[in-house]
Image (cartoon, helix red, strand yellow):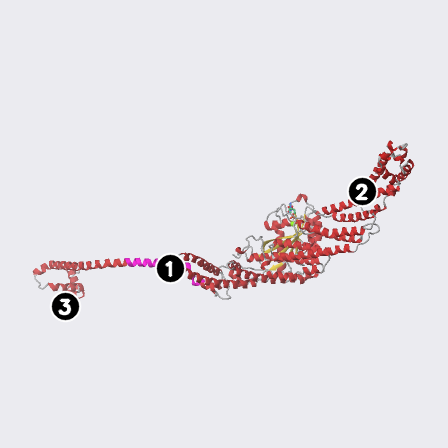
Amino acid sequence: MTEKEISVQGSSEGSTTSNPLSRKLNKILETRLENDKETLEALKALSTFFHENSLRTRRNLRGDIERRSLSISEEFADVFSIVKNAARDQTADLINKTTDLQKESQKLDMRAKVADAFLAKYQLKTEEVRVLRGTREGHLHEDFFQALNRVKQIHNDCKVLLRTNQQTAGLEIMESMALHQETAYERLYRWTQGECRSLTSDTVDVTSIHCRAMEALQDRPVLFRYVLDEFGTARRTAVVRGFIDALTRGGPGGTPRPIELHSHDPLRYVGDMLAWLHQASASEKEHLISLLRMATAQRPVSESGPLDICNKYPSLQQDLRELVRVEQVIVAEPGPMVLYKLANLLKFYKYTIGQLLNKEAALTSTLSEMEEFAQKVFFNALNVLASKLVEKVELPPADLGPTATLSQTLSLLQEILASHDSSVVSMDLREQDFARILTSVLDPLMQMCSLSASRLNPADMATYMINCLHAMQTTLSLYEYTDQRLEMLQAQTDAHVDTLVNEQASFILSRTALLQIYSIALQHKPEEGPLASLTGLNTSAIKDGMTHFDGFLATPDNYTLPQCNFLQSTAIREKIHQRAMNLIQGAYELLYKAIHNPDNQYQEPNSIMVRTPEQVKTLLS
Amino acid sequence: MTSGPYNYSYIFKYIIIGDMGVGKSCLLHQFTEKKFMADCPHTIGVEFGTRIIEVSGQKIKLQIWDTAGQERFRAVTRSYYRGAAGALMVYDITRRSTYNHLSSWLTDARNLTNPNTVIFLIGNKSDLEAQRDVTYEEAKQFAEENGLLFLEASAKTGEHVEEAFLDTARKIYQNILDGSLDLNAAETGVQHKPSAPDSNQANLEPGGGKDSCSC
Ligand SMILES: Nc1nc2c(ncn2[C@@H]2O[C@H](COP(=O)(O)OP(=O)(O)OP(=O)(O)O)[C@@H](O)[C@H]2O)c(=O)[nH]1
Ligand SMILES: [Mg+2]
């Protein structure tokens, strides 16, 4: 073959390659059959049934191959149809199984989802558990409160489980949540307590996480109260320190001066302490509001609403009692006047601080007690004073004016009323005290005056009493709420004025020798016979009296009752004078009519009584 | 979450003084409520109001004590001077007598407050120009002679009300910065919050704390 190849190659070298036949031949020759596996296989297969190489067989070759191919295919198809049938049966089974499995799988999926959802709803995440437990000294963070809320929520949701047939699960979960909650609240409590404990500086810096903690603690009222107590104790430290500073240190460089420096001036001393307390209460109230700004369940929402700080600061009360030395000041008996002003000051602060705090706040009630105490000591002092008045009664002075004791007591009363009037206490509160003060002072004073007047003659007594009453009236008339008292005093004055008017008129009539004549004429009845016939009423006696009376008309001032000159009130003096003159004029008129009455048988009555009553009236007015 | 009415680093106490009827309560009301109270009753004793302001980026809470001008309360109101960092001394520009009494108010203020207390003179009712009884110039001179800050204001229109309260606070803050007001002394009328520990501060920032996993 190699020889042939070479010869072919040799012969083709010289000839042209464009000859189609030689190209084809070349191609065939170049074919390397030993390398063509397909052809080799085909030839091998052919040799199995192509036994003799003859023309006939060669001619039938194609047909044979085709037939063979067909029969193989048929055989193949037969075999496959068996396989196919077998496969079909098996697949149906498989499909059924698969469907079943799919269904199963869906069911399980569903269950898994339910279980997941259940777990998500009823179990804490590990992260959450960790956050809740925290470390002992670890700070609280926002996630703590979220976890705490989750626990609460789950615990709450368990109630739904208890209503289903999942009771066991419900109970178990509830129990475990309760445990979580306890640990968490314990931790919350410790943290918040520590936080509160540190709030001892002047200004309180309540962080919002602290507020959250207070809000959360509301669910545990006992812990909430403990924490507030802790806060109270811390604030007490701050307030007491500040107060002591104000008492003893004063401002920078001693200005303002320490409050203690004013301890000799009780009003200033107590006033400064109470004002300080008032301002501190306002600040502390704000601090408490700031602390509880989220804990709305435990306090009224409105910030201006009553808020009982002091009951939250129970221990502060003790200190204040000891520090605010109001009681000592009161016990030192600074005199009724100062006591009274102190009582008023306390009343003012009770009201003012009471507006800031709850009415039942301990501070307000402490102030109330102090105020009552001051009031009691004040009235005691007044009563002691009053009983002294009645104990040793002085004789009226020669001028029948008020005694020194009366003047002193009245000026004290005046001072009290004046301070009452300019008091910082509201009107209706003032009115209450008034009656009591007046009773305490005026009744014993009246007694004292009556006692000291008891041995005097009527004119002296009336004058003295009028003077005393006048002094009292003058004092009272300057102030409010004294109308009733003034009315009583006026009624008594009027009675004594009546006495004096009569005394004055009698005095004039007796000085002019007309008293006898007038009284007889006054009581005269016609059946006693004519007046002129009665002894002492003859013409000459009356003429004599008229001469005196002319003297009186000429200089009426000389006929004034000496006591009337001692009357301290010119108005009363004038009034008594006027009324006495009216009486005289009336007496004159009565006499005049009697003399001019023909029945009385006076000759020439006009020569006996020269002046007509009108003339006398004009002269006397 | 950290803002709101609870966050401030200083508290300044003010006191408002002056004759009755000059408009002290109205000024306070205008400052805290931004409203004019036309028929304001006489103050009984003392009242107080608060507002948070900002000075140089610092939040400051003003606690303002409004005193009664009526004479009968004088003894009581005197006790409130001691804690004041600022004193607003008010007169009524339409009533000369209220201006004439300033020296007596000033004496009280000087004697009863601490040496650093900032005193601000306010001529109130500047809206009533037609009834003016005290000129701006003489009041200005009085203020200068006595080292007072001074403005004419109107509680009715609100003119200069903010300024008076804020300028006082600025002056107080200035005194703190330059050290003339010693915060360690008692009764300066200024309370300063201890600068909050950083850990606490960090807690306030949601998610901001790196140490949130420290446990
Ligand atoms: N036109 C005008 N009236 C004012 C102004 N400020 C106050 N008033 C009026 O002045 C009166 C007194 O104001 P108050 O604020 O009560 O005075 P006060 O100084 O607080 O008085 P006391 O509490 O008694 O010391 C009120 O009737 C106000 O309406 C103002 O700026 N302009
Ligand atoms: Mg007022």
Task: Depth check: give the residue in front, B141 or B173.
Answer: B173
What residue sits right under mark 1 in the picture? A115
Task: For residue A422, say whether it is visible.
Answer: no
Label 3 residue SS: helix
Point out residue A550 in the picture as x, y percentages from the top left corner. Answer: 89, 38
Whole-percent x, y for residue A431 in the image: 68, 49
Chain label for disc 1: A
Q: Is residue A372 magenta?
A: no
A551 and A427: which is toward the camera: A551
Q: Which mark is residue A575?
A: 2
Image location of residue A21, percent across then percent down: 14, 59
Seen at 82% across and 44% down, the residue is: A500
Foreground disc of the pair 3, 1: 1
Mark 3 C-beta to ligand 1 under 8 Å? no
User: Disc 3 designates what residue?
Assistant: A3
Picture coordinates of residue A532, whole percent (x, y) = 89, 35
Q: CA distance from mark 2 to mark 1?
A: 111 Å
What range of the chain is rendered magenta? A99-128
Q: CA distance from mark 3 to mark 1?
A: 88 Å
Chain ID at mark 3: A
Which amino acid is tagged 2?
Lys
Query: Toward the viewer: A180 or B119?
Result: A180
Foreground mark, 2 or 1, reads 2
Observer able to see residue B153: yes
Q: Secondary structure at mark 2?
A: helix
**Callout 1 amino acid:** Ala
